[in-house]
Amino acid sequence: MNQIVRIMATLTTLLVLLEFGGDFNLLAQETNVELAVESSLDVQSREVINDAFGLGERLLFSLGWGFITAGQATLEVVDTNTIGDHLCYRITSRTTSNSVVDKFYKVRDTIISQIDVDGIFSCYFFKSLNEGSYHSIREIYFDHVGGEAICHKDQDQVDTLSIEQFSHDIISAFYYVRTQTLEVGQTLHVPTVSGNKKHLLEVRVLKRETVEVPAGEFRCLVVEPLLSATGIFRHEGRIRVWLTDDRLHMPVLMKSKVVVGSIYAELKEFRLGDMDW
């Protein structure tokens, strides 16, 4: 049962499941060439048009396994601040188990991502996991000019990685995908740092579908981030995320079939952000 709740807790960020499910798939060599071309640009020169989210956006999800409601998670664009020369959105994600689950496996997880406002790439990432008796803190500092990510784990382990400019953490990768024009059949490739490793995340846009969740009925695009066949997930296990089929690309549903059954995150309440600040 602890494993089930641990899987549930990772739904905090929707895509953070990738960290517990195994390594990202590495992509073909031609993708690396395309990324290398982009990384030769001045880090200050990228500007991503963002019509998808803004200050004050808050999403509340109900988390469950099968017929069991296990807790809730929030994603919120809290405010802006400055990291170095970068004006950043501060995005927080919090997961809490409910009172029933608390009795045998209390979950209180917090994730913070600082995302460059103009370029929608990561400048800083913080993750605090408090799950039962397990506690862990991770931090990642992104130096896009120097091409490095400095990864700290529990103040003991420090790893320095060579990265592509405009690389992402797991939260900023998700928000970056939301800003993109998505079409069925399209595949996005996003350079991402997770834990103390760098990966290329592949996100496929599969189909259109209308779904109903507690927050209402939504016409959606179904996207799939690809996983390798390691960790808790079988090869046939899939994570699918339903994003609204409009400029917001707001996540309303996520499902994953794992060894122990199916888990889900359903949008329960939402508040749209200010696009004109």
Image (cartoon, rainbow, N blue to C red):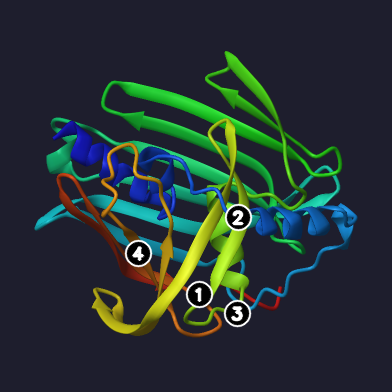
In the rendering, which numbered label is found on residue 181? 3
Which residue is the site of mark 2?
28
Can residue 155 be seen from the camera position used here? yes
The percent coordinates of residue 68 (x first, y second) are: 11, 53
In the rendering, which numbered label is found on residue 272? 1
Tell me which label, 4 or 3, sits earlier in the chain.
Answer: 3
Q: Is residue 105 left or right of residue 268?
A: left
Q: Is residue 120 left or right of residue 52?
A: right
Q: Secondary structure at mark 3?
A: loop
Q: Residue at x 55, y 48 (%)?
A: 26
Q: Nearer the viewer, mark 1 or mark 3?
A: 3
Q: Is residue 207 left or right of residue 137?
A: left
Tell me which label, 2 or 4, sits earlier in the chain.
Answer: 2
Tell me which label, 1 or 3, sits earlier in the chain.
Answer: 3
Residue type at the position of mark 1: Leu
Asked whether disc 3 touches disc 2, contact meaning CB atoms under 8 Å apart, the reply is no
